Image (spheres, rainbow, N blue to C red):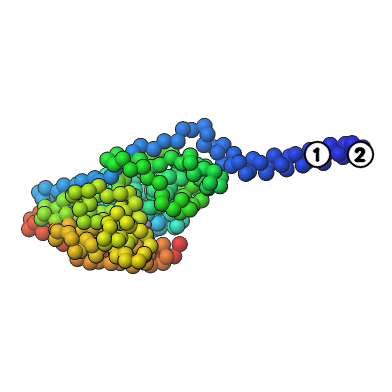
Amino acid sequence: MARAVKFGVVGVVLLVLTVIGVLRSGWMCEIETVAVAVWLPPMGVLEKVVYEGDRDFRLLFIGDVHGQYRELISLIEEEAGGLDERTTVVLLGDMVSKGADSEKVVDFVLQNRDRVKYVFGNHELATLFAYLNPELNCKPLEKVRERLLPLRFSDTKELFYPKDLSKVKKEHSKLAKQLGPVVLKELALHGSLALRFELPNRQMLYAVHAGMLPGDFATTTPSVHSLTEMKFVDPTNWKRTSKSKFPGAERWYKLWDRNNEKHTTVLYGHDAKSGLNLRDRTKGLDSGCVKGGKLSALEYVYDHKNGEVTTRLLQTKCDQA
Ligand SMILES: [Mn+2]
């Protein structure tokens, strides 16, 4: 009898140790992904759209949606009168994460891909990065760091790893799993880091998530970090960009104001703290929808009869996520 108890106790101890070992190794996390090779196509850097001026069109630039599907539909359908033939919606990145309905937003965007374009925000990149690296958020970072796969882009050799890996959260891994490989590949294929619209009145509109520096795409290829994460820049060394303020740092749009030609406007999101920020040649459209603020759209309408472009601001009130 005593011997049976002894064996029992040893058995239980071994079992507990095995379970602890399995959990620590992260094996439970990997098991679902080992069977499928994880791969993403290289993503676009800059997509150019040229309008000849022989027909009417409308561009609708929308700030960070963050999974607020109801508000997105309300803005497009009620405020903007819907997705008609002449309309192209441009989402300025961070369409996913934080809010409840990221999946619905992605579905809507991909279902309407001939009318809806988007640039990648840091949250799309985090989700795609989490998909490529299923070990992340399963095992301790120091164990997986060396094995991480980067995101790749078609027109730049830069291999992209998020600057701060702790910003790739469980939420992103979970969303990557929910969306699944097929949808994620479509998401990677259909988007780009930047969009450039050349209007018939010689005006040029860039859409990016975070910001641009003078000369970007004209003389230099900007980094993925600066396009998707930058808020501040060192005016004496433009390669030094950051999401947070540092000594001597300036807002990127002040450099843009000082240095760039008149006809080029940058539309962006990413900066909910500054909120709606409509300046002469830069238009910040993240007005904090996910925090209970507003979802904003800047509309550009071209009338081919008089050759003029008119703009209008449209907004929807948001529920806090
Ligand atoms: Mn952002």
Mark 2 Cα within 10 Å, few/some/many (few <14, many 20+)?
few
Front one among 91 and 101: 91
Cβ(mark 2) to ligand 1 < 8 Å? no
Q: Residue at x 33, y 43 (%)?
A: 158
Q: Which mark is residue 2?
A: 2
The circle drawn on residue 104 is none
Q: Is mark 1 within 8 Å of ligand 1?
A: no
Q: Please indicate, yes or no, whether residue 22 appears anywhere in the rendered image.
A: yes
Residue 279: give x, y in percent of width and height: 23, 66
The foreground one among 261 and 275 is 261
* Relative image position of residue 252 (x, y in whole percent): 27, 61
Quick one: SS at disc 1?
Answer: helix
Vertical position of residue 313 compared to residue 198: above or below: below
Q: Are marks 1 and 2 in contact (CB under 8 Å)?
A: no
Disc 2 residue type (three-letter): Ala
Q: Residues within 10 Å of mark 1 (few under 14, many from 20)?
A: few
Residue 150 placement, left or right of 260: right
Q: Which mark is residue 10?
A: 1
Distance between the alpha carbons at the discs numbered 1 and 2: 12 Å
Asked if residue 92 is positioned above or below residue 20 in the image, the reply reads: below
Residue pictured at 23% horizontal, 62% vertical: 255
Q: Earlier in the sequence, mark 1 or mark 2?
A: 2
Residue at horizontal 36%, vertical 64%?
A: 246
Q: Position of residue 253 (x, y in %)?
A: 25, 62
Q: Secondary structure at mark 2?
A: helix
Using the rendered view, name the quadrant where residue 206 is placed.
Answer: bottom left
Report whether residue 75 is seen.
no
Could you say which quadrant of the image residue 273 lies in?
A: bottom left
Residue sitting nearer the eye, 316 or 84: 316
